[in-house]
Amino acid sequence: MRQAPLSVLFPRSQLRSVLFAPTKGGVVIATALAPTPGTEPGTGSSTGPRPGDLRLLLPAGAAWAVTAGVLGPGSGHGAALAMAAGAAAVLGLTLFVLGIRTSTGSTRGRSVAVTAGVVLLTAAAAAAATLLHTADLRRGPLPELARTGDPAPEVGVDLTVTGDPRVRVSRSGGSGAGQSLLTVEAVVDRVTVPDGRLRGEPGPRTVRTRTPVTVLVRGEDVAAWEPLLPSARLVAEVTVRPPGEGDHGSAALLIAHGEPRASAPPSLPQRIAGRLRAGLRSATDGLPPDERGLLPGLVVGDTSRLPDELREAFRDTDLAHLVAVSGANLAIVLGVLIGAPGRAGTAERRGLAALLGIPLRTTALVGAAVTLAFVTICRPEPSVLRAAGTGLIGLLALATGRPRRAVPALAGTALLLILLDPYLARSFGFLLSVLATAGLLVLGPRWADALRARGWPRHLAGAVGAAAAAQALCAPVTVLLSGHVSLVGIPCNLLAELAVAPATLLGFAVLIADPVSPALARILAEPAAVPTGWLAAVARHGAELPGGRLSWPGGWFGTVSLAVGTAALCWTVPLLLPGRSTGPRRWRSPRGWIRPVVTGALLLVLLTVLLRPPPLARIATGWPPPDWRLVMCDVGQGDMVVLPVPPEGGGPPDSAVVVDAGPDPREADRCLRDLGIDRVPLFLATHFHADHVEGLPGVLRGRRVGAVEGTAVDDPPGEAARVAAWVARAGVPLVRAAPGERRSAGPRVSWEVLWPEGEESSVVSGPNNASVVLRVAVAGGLRFALLGDLEPPAQEALLSRLRAAGKENEVDVLKVAHHGSAYQDWSLTEVLSPRLALISCGEGNPYGHPSPRTVDRLRALGATVLRTDRVGDIAVTGAGPGDLGASVHPRGERPGHGRSGARASRAAEPGVASAARGGHGPRAPPG
């Protein structure tokens, strides 16, 4: 059989850039087969949506707004909402009938009446559908037990799994090794309530119900729950608790005890889908880590093996769609079947269906089957549902010979999906998907035409116009979720476009081949790894560029300000792009220079605000203070200390020794960026608990790191292995701290390792007591003691060693051990006699850190106590012991954390450490 040329499957000038939004934030660009909206086949001019295309926007918007309101502020007012929906339905029907049957009056007036009637009827239908869908959240025994159970009741449940189990490791909450947690959505079909737990029911009772819940599984039981597939039925013993904050679709949180007992297997389609997903994972086992984790995510949304740092890189570069299946994947698959949709109903149609001579209606049926299979395999995520709905409407138009209009299809899809699943109205993933697609359909063609009119190549203009349009509409929403913007999002998306289609098609080939021949699937996975590796490289390198992740004010203020800024940018950019006009240009006149100059100045100011060069940031915020000697970063429930290395020629330091990195790479990177640090001669991990080392990728990101030093005890081993993997990937040597070790970074920063004794010490039992303890000396004679997470037995042994060596020296600043817990050896603290005590802990942490008893005891010893959970970042300042002070950088005064302040730090008076909330001043210096 003669092989068809590529132009048959992918006709020239029909490969378009289609943007979709992911499930969880970010802007999506992927290669898909689609015509320019409003373009007639064979023409090159795009007209955009016609006026008639916008008729469904008002009903869809009304349904969306009403549904979101009923699920949010309106929840709990069912009777009033039902009456309001009935009244709206009656009024809407009246207006609709009057507009249709009235022969008097203007055409415009009748049209307004019909439109208002349709909007009211749609709003009433949305309210009624939402009330019906949410009725199960308040019906049955589980909601009552969740509200009133104290202590939490234990019940037996028969449930049906409705979602995929999701496994994560809880690392950032504290200092433990991390616990495996699994959550899965389910519907409870029957509840067996023990004796006396229900009001008015004295004995045990079994109740049939249809209650949506979230099941939480912890520890060793995770392995038994992880293989479950949607539609499986099982029996379990659970504890009933209220649903988590923001979990609007669950009536209760069920904490499972023990393994589930299967009562019925999953349905056949779900078993087939599960087998295909497992086969794809198996076929990619031999690939490098990035490709092994990314290819299943790109094809079916399986991100269980995606490296954490790569996941962060995709988020930072607005490539998150690549790890969450979007509508672009479906568009690519359908494009292979039907070719370019703009020509699918003509004699010039392309694709496999045309090549095989399949009739149009049969092609539409096959396309619908492919769409349903795609949703089953890739799971009904919001963006997948949106794409499937739009695709099915297009296929219906293809089968019936009706004209295909993208904007009405999008509006109709959104309307139908919200009526069928009201929870989509409060899904940011669904909102982003609709916004990105709307940007493509409405703004993308116009912007592409404008670029082509200025001489841009056709395909480049289309890609840039589409990417910019989706970014413009989605960025105000994503900043509400993430508190950051990316200046490299559009370039990275354009580079990713080159590889998305090949990676997707080869990935689906692996998926299909594995059940037939696993060996063939493994062979196909090798070429699929090439474009997949390109995507990973684009994300990793893009995240390291300046502007890869820029903080932005969070909340609605950040959303509105970014929307206004985007609108201003759209207004000014055309002035900076040269046109092809041969006539006299307006800006050549003397007064015509004003607007371009103002535009350029505004763009310069915008870039300055976004990039925040350290010298300008210091002037604008006062952070860090000019004479800072140490900074304790506010990284949540964890530790991170930065010791600056002053440059020999003077000026602000750009190099620092970093001790620990906290639990969050983003916060670690943020702190160092705020300080202007781009070189780290040494990173020291006091021990390998997650709240001290999980932020290490943020320290390594975009910085030159000389070496990483850790304690001699690899405990917990899993976390120690993660650190070793990160260090090896960065090409940085990993060394071990030894007692008595002395090091320096330049002539004005030096330190000595006081602890641990070594790997064989009888005192070193557990990771906390293996913490590396440092005594640091900096310029001017200031002395710091950093105690890690040392506990009383090791503190006592450390004190004995100091006394034996005659090193019972006082220090000026103490990093209090173990986040200020109640377990301290106060003899050691009295010997160190600090004047300033720093405690790093997370606001509202579940461990009660710091202990009030510890804070009171430190103050009784004469120390000023500063806590990161109350004052944010803390900078120790001063030219010497007689000039000791501190400045703070509150969380609320940093970009991306709500409000912004005129001054983000407060300088301390000589001899006084300033605190945000009171405290005692330090003792006067000796002598």
Image: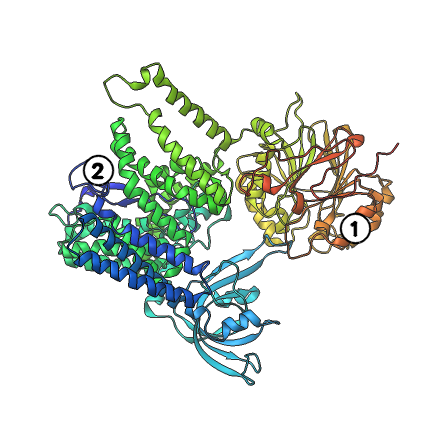
- Expressed as whole percent of the image width and height from the top left, the position of residue 382 reads 37, 55
Image-quadrant location for residue 200: bottom right
Where is mark 2, residue-wise?
46
Amino acid type, label 2: Ser
Measuring 71% from the left and 44% from the top, which residue is drawn there? 917
Quarter of the image holding residue 40?
Answer: top left
Q: Position of residue 401 (x, y in %)?
A: 14, 54
Rounded to the nearest angstrom, the CA distance separating label 2 from label 1 is 72 Å
Tell me the quadrant of the picture where the C terminus can be found: top right
Q: Pointer 2: residues within 10 angstroms few (<14), some, or many (20+)?
A: some
At 39% across and 43% down in the image, what residue appears? 474
Label total for image: 2
Residue bearing the label numbered 1:
856
471 left or right, relative to 579:
right
The image quadrant that residue 101 belongs to is: bottom left
In this view of the protein, can residue 229 be seen by the observer?
Answer: no
Query: Is residue 333 depicted above or below 47 in this figure?
Result: below
Residue 616 seen in this snapshot: yes
